């Protein structure tokens, strides 16, 4: 479901886009209402994982976004919080494939509380800031916020997401 965004939001989107590209009118974008759903993922490694620390995941999105995604972790470091030594910060990149040539590219940042027991849940929150896409999502802006838990012993994660996506209108 989509709706028209108000004038102030269109102006803010337009100004943000000016900072990164040639001038584009905010009316050239269509924005979603907040969308939500669930996700699952599995740790994946091997030669196809380009992570400098060896952590990649593949997953499935259900709900308002139906598709698959691949995440590559680029950094992982302790937060330095003396009250919580299990708290780590990470960054990465994601590709969300929504089928039919529609893909969204994102830069991820998040916080994970790594459980010292590998069979126990390690909760995390990730924010994916869009940096464009392909197909209907070429030039997409917006973000996904996902919260979930990872079980290191199995490599499986699950959780939920909410998102707002603005993509360029196409005159087909």
Image (cartoon, helix red, strand yellow):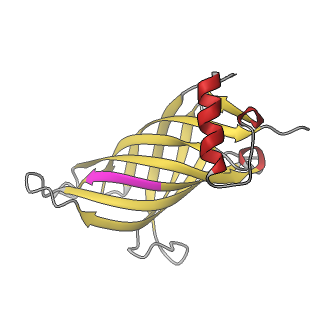
Q: Residue at x 70, y 40 (%)?
A: 167
In percent of the image, x 21 and y 50: which residue is there? Answer: 120
Residue 137 in sight here: yes
In which image quadrant can residue 64 be found?
top right
Q: Which residues are magenta?
A: 108-112
Q: Is residue 109 magenta?
A: yes
Taking the spot 16% from the left edge, 61% from the top edge, the residue there is: 80
Q: Is residue 82 left or right of residue 41?
A: left
- Find residue 52 and report its horizontal and vertical position in percent: 42, 76
Q: Residue at x 46, y 45 (%)?
A: 40
Compared to residue 138, the image places residue 159 above or below, namely: above
Is 72 part of what is drawn in magenta? no
- The residue lying furthest to the left in this view is 83
Q: Compared with residue 110, is residue 66 higher up or lower down, i.e. above or below?
A: above
How would you classify the magenta stretch by its main secondary structure? strand
**Residue 66, percent from left and from top:** 62, 38
Up-down: is 102 above or below 3? below
Q: Position of residue 152 (x, y in %)?
A: 30, 58
């Amino acid at each position: 479901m989509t709706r028209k965004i108000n004038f102030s939001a269109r102006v803010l989107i337009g100004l943000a886009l000016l900072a990164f590209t040639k001038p584009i009118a905010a009316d050239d974008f269509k924005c979603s209402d907040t969308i939500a759903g669930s996700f699952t993922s599995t740790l994946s490694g091997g030669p196809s994982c380009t992570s400098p620390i060896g952590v990649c995941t593949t997953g499935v999105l259900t709900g308002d976004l139906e598709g698959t995604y691949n995440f590559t972790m680029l950094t992982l470091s302790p937060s330095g919080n003396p009250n919580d030594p299990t708290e780590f910060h990470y960054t990465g990149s994601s590709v969300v494939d929504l089928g039919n040539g529609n893909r969204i590219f994102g830069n991820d940042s998040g916080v994970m509380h790594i459980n010292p027991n590998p069979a126990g849940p390690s909760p995390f929150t990730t924010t994916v800031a869009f940096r464009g896409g392909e197909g209907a999502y070429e030039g997409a802006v917006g973000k996904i916020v996902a919260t979930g838990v990872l079980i290191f012993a199995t490599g499986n994660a699950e959780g939920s997401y909410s998102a707002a996506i603005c993509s360029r209108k196409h005159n087909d």
